[in-house]
Amino acid sequence: MVNRHAVDPQFDLFIPFVADLPLRDQRETMERPFFSLAKRKRLKPIEYKSPNGEIFVNVYPNPEFGMATIWDADILIWAASTLNDMKKRGSNDLPRTLSFHPYDLLRTICRETGGRQYLLLREALGRLQATSIVTNIRVQKGKKQRQFSWIESWTDVTDESTHQSLGMSLTLSDWFYEGILMDGGLLAIDPVYFSITGGRQRWLYRVARKHAGGAGPEGFAIPLETMFEKSGAEGTFRRFKFEIQGIVRRNDLPEFHLSLETGKSGELLVRMIRREPTMTSAPSRALAPALPIEPAPLPAAAMSPAMPLFRHRHLSEGIIERIRKNFPGWDVYALQAEFNDWLDEQPERNPSDYEAAFYGFVRRYDAKNHL
């Protein structure tokens, strides 16, 4: 059996696994259309220009690998979080090349650690290296644009007899590395982000975190048409609008309350308001006691006649972690949306203990659908 922590002489230093690593996302990648939002292979380029014409982002996929996806970006979140943690611990010389065990990286981004996940990790690294980005964001004076890939290179050292990975390394692009180091370049994100399965939901969370995270009780509102342009999503605006309306209707995005409203010019807006924290401790990926905690009331700006607010339909961190431990592999928030739809079918379905009822629903769902 290969020792997962056997140090290969090609590596100078392995990044140690840090339990509950404080997660950070690079601010400039959270809003603009840098990634494909679809899991299928995307070969159509993204060509975005801001309404005032000052900012542009062009993303070109590789014909063989396709375009880097928003799920591939989890690796960049891990890298940004790792470097930020090293900086907080007093490291003065932060490397662009990170050497790590794939097992540790996968654990940090809440992925399974089986053989298929190692294969998917290699494919993701391939897309991150092969995707080409051209933009004028953070371009030095006198220059028009910069072109780069997310990672400059990556390696995987395997055992010759077992073909198991002994360690991997990746070298970040200058552009992304500089974004990590610059003042205000990183924003904290909730670990529950990794459980979001839909590409549009992931992108919407990142937009909300960037704009509504510190926007106060009124939050942040953005026209749907502007969202469509900034997302880089394939397909028509009509389809995008339909899907975003569905996400807002479910209103199960972590950390943020969503509602629809009409702007002064008659355009449809999505308003994002950060929910009041319901636990005094910092978010943790460890199992916490199941304590039903009533969330604080949302401000009046969060209320929308078209979007009913169910304060009693809150899941504490404890029950979420309990469900993930006892019934692994399911999307808790997708199941919650399904459970809420079932409750809404008949008004008398109003459990006195919402969390207990939902737990029972997931238990029955798992027993019926578990392979």
Image: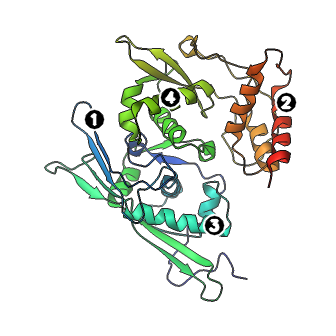
What residue is shown at x 54% (from left), y 80% (from top)?
157
Tell me the tag on residue 242: 4
The answer to whether the residue labelled 2 contacts the one labelled 3, judged by CB atoms less than 8 Å apart, is no
Question: In front: 56, or 143?
Answer: 56
What residue is shown at x 49% (from left), y 82% (from top)?
10
For label 2, the residue is: 357
**Residue type for callout 1:** Ser
What residue is shown at x 80% (from left), y 48% (from top)?
369
For discs 4 and 2, the disc positioned in front in the rendered view? 4
What residue is shown at x 42% (from left), y 61% (from top)?
128
Q: Toward which corner of the image does residue 49 lie, by quadrant?
A: top left
Q: Is residue 94 among what the camera can see? A: no
**Residue type for callout 4:** Phe
* Residue at the far left in the pictured view: 142
* Residue at the far bottom in the pictured view: 161
Q: Residues within 10 Å of mark 3 (few under 14, many from 20)?
A: few
> Looking at the picture, how far across and down is residue 19, in whole percent?
66, 56
- Mark 2 or mark 3: whose residue is earlier in sequence: 3
Residues at marks 1 and 4, CA–CA distance in whole angstroms: 23 Å
Residues at marks 2 and 3, CA–CA distance in whole angstroms: 34 Å
* SS at badge 2: helix
For label 1, the residue is: 50
Residues at marks 3 and 1, CA–CA distance in whole angstroms: 39 Å
For label 3, the residue is: 116
Question: In front: 278, or 362?
Answer: 362
Q: Is residue 329 among what the camera can see? A: yes
The answer to whether the residue labelled 3 contacts the one labelled 4, judged by CB atoms less than 8 Å apart, is no
Image quarter hosting the C terminus: bottom right
**Residue type for callout 2:** Ala
